Amino acid sequence: MKSYKPTTPSRRHMTTVSYKAKLSTGTPHKPLVRGGKRQSGRNSYGRITMRHHGGGHKRRFRDIDFVYDKRDIKAKVETVEYDPHRSGFIGLVCYEDGERRYVVLPQNVGVGSVIVTSEKAPRKPGNRMPLSRIPLGTFVYNVELKPGGGAKIARSAGSHVEVVAHDGAYTNLKMPSSEIRKVIKTAWASIGEVSNEEHRLVTIGKAGRSRWLGIRPTVRGSAMNPVDHPHGGGEGKSGRGRRRAVSKWGKPTGKGQKTRRSKKYSNTFILERRKVGKKRK
């Protein structure tokens, strides 16, 4: 991690990842880069559907390969790069047939490393194979939920999923949230943990840096009036006045409360619900 001299109160505790020591280039591969306008939390009608989003520095979108449909063809990592749209590092890989793609890189994989997507791939970081061929206790990332559907699980910095059991047609996986769920064995996953594990240690330091990232301010419900939030009102600093914390619309939120829909389609695949609070591990 990189720290700074305390030239200002906000600078005193600010930290960033030491990018110079980890990245090999600052210029992306132009054919795999495109522009675009961010939605800033708004839907197609222009209405805010996700609060606290907006502004931020202009970004260019990198076309990342999450499907990995080039099977049994080795690829060499040419660069390790920063992607403004994700927390983990990405790498430009060149396949033996000459095609180049961006992929999310795992830890301990850098320039010159060779990775492959194959049912017979060796079990080393970056290689991709079906869940049925991955031994118990292995950490994986970029996990599919359906065969050929592309990576959906464990894509952010430092995250991983643990293979805990093979049971019939399914593999039981322990998610980063501590939830244990079953995924069909024919789905694919990559060996390893996502790179840039220090991302969780970053201290933003000042409000302006959050605005650069496109994060708008969040006002506490207890600081509002009763008409604006269920926690609002009261003289001075008051408690929320109710047993359970709720959102602006009265729905349960935070503090270890269950917010999952009782009839969600994937309930049948969950073997053990995620743990919340201090006893999460």
Image (cartoon, rainbow, N blue to C red):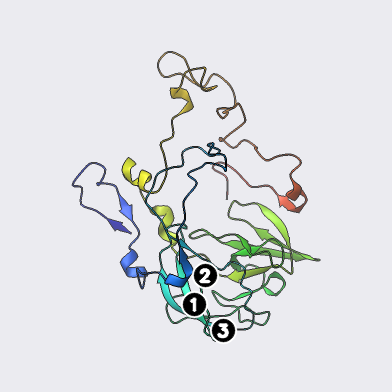
Q: Are marks 1 and 2 in contact (CB under 8 Å)?
A: yes
- Count all numbered tags in the image, as a single digit: 3
Q: Quadrant of residue 208?
A: top left
Looking at the picture, does residue 237 appear above or below residue 275?
Answer: above
3 and 1 marks in contact (CB < 8 Å) = no
Say what amino acid the circle numbered 2 marks. Answer: Val
Residue 275 drawn above or below residue 115: above
Dot 2 falls on a residue whose secondary structure is: strand
Residue at the farthest left position: 7
Q: Is residue 196 above or below residue 24?
A: above
Residue under the point 71% across and 39% down: 261
Q: Of the residues shown, which amino acid type is indicated by label 1?
A: Val
Which residue, given by chain and number where applicable, does mark 2 sit on?
103
Q: Which residue is mark 1?
A: 93
Residue beneath disc 3: 74
Secondary structure found at label 1: strand
Q: Are marks 2 and 3 in contact (CB under 8 Å)?
A: no
- Considering every residue shown, the one lying at the far right of the view is 168
Quadrant of residue 244 within the rendered picture: top right
Residue lying at 49% horizontally and 60% vertically, measured from the top left: 158
Left or right, 268 with respect to 214, comes to right
Mark 2 to mark 3: distance in Å?
14 Å
N-term mark: 2 or 3? 3
* Residue 100 in sight in this render: yes
Amino acid type shown at disc 3: Lys
